[in-house]
Amino acid sequence: MRSLPRVVIEPLVRATLLEDLGRAGDLTTDAVISPDARAEVALVAREPGVIAGVDCARLAWELVDPRIEIRDLLPDGSRVQPGTVIGIASGPARGLLSGERTALNFLGHLSGVATGTATIADAIAHTQARVADTRKTIPGLRALQKHAVVAGGGSNHRFGLDDAVLIKDNHIAVAGGVTQAVAAAKAHVGHMVKIEVEVDTLDQLAELLQAGADAVLLDNMGPDQLREAVAMVAGRLITEASGRITPATAVPIAEAGVDLISVGWLTHSARVLDIGLDYLG
């Protein structure tokens, strides 16, 4: 898959290294390890999963010491099993040890996002539905997390408030209704901007079908209600289901015929994939 541009990831990796190294650098490594020592280490998966964040790991070591060589890195999106070698790094031992935690933090977290996404993508692969992320991301890491979702077989929802219109329940309440909110949005944005509206009931959906939009977010509806909603839409809008979806509940929701399933926990509560650093010599 396509890598994120370095200009996107470098500020994040650099800030993380600065946070870790602080004002005096790595006191432990500088005290214990000779400046002439060299080492070789391997990034190794401890459990099954999908890898993401290899460019962040590579850059973490490169910024600490450009003499460090990283080779045989698996690309983002690779499936791994316990014992799979993700990549090998060699060079000055001090740099390898000082950059270790930053490299592993990015790699473990983003691989966790990719792995969580894959659990749902795999479960619903027999349907037309795709799993998508949300804006419920860790502050500052949105681009990286959304990249990891794609690595896990998912799709990206909007990246921010500025690239699409998503009219939610509070917008509707303040605007005075679905029809009023949609009309105001159409009058405000350009023809290239998509409009999606969240509905909680089939009555709201009927009103939206009259108002017109590009997509509908069917919030907290069960499979039977979703099936009825999909029939009402009849292909006129992109249909998206959301609301506390788990790998178990995703299957009947996808089988109801929706186009997308959006899941917030993929990014805001991703479980870290266990990846270790093994000393080779």
Image (spheres, grey):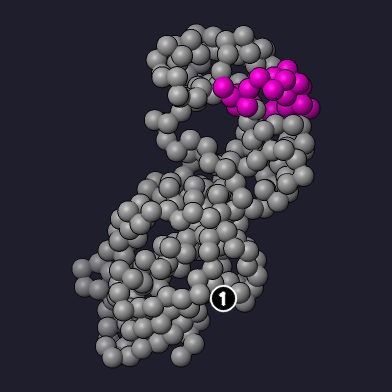
Taking 109 as reference, is 27 left or right? Answer: left
Residue range (magenta): 214-238
- Residue assigned mark 1: 85
In the image, residue 20 sits, relative to residue 70, either above or below, namely: above
Q: Which residue is drawn at 43% across and 63% down?
A: 55
Residue 162 picture quarter: top left
Of the pair 69 and 114, the residue shown nearer to us: 69
**Residue 233 shown in magenta:** yes
Q: Residue at x 26, y 88 (%)?
A: 35
In the image, residue 257 sits, relative to residue 200, either above or below, namely: below
Mark 1 is surrounded, within 10 Å at the Cα level, by few (under 14), some (14 to 19) or many (20 or more) other residues, namely many
**Residue 188 seen from this side:** yes
**Residue 244 shown in magenta:** no
Of the pair 146 and 191, the residue shown nearer to us: 191
> In the rendering, at what x and y percent does residue 154 appear?
60, 46
> In the rendering, at what x and y percent does residue 29 appear?
31, 82
Residue 56 picture quarter: bottom left
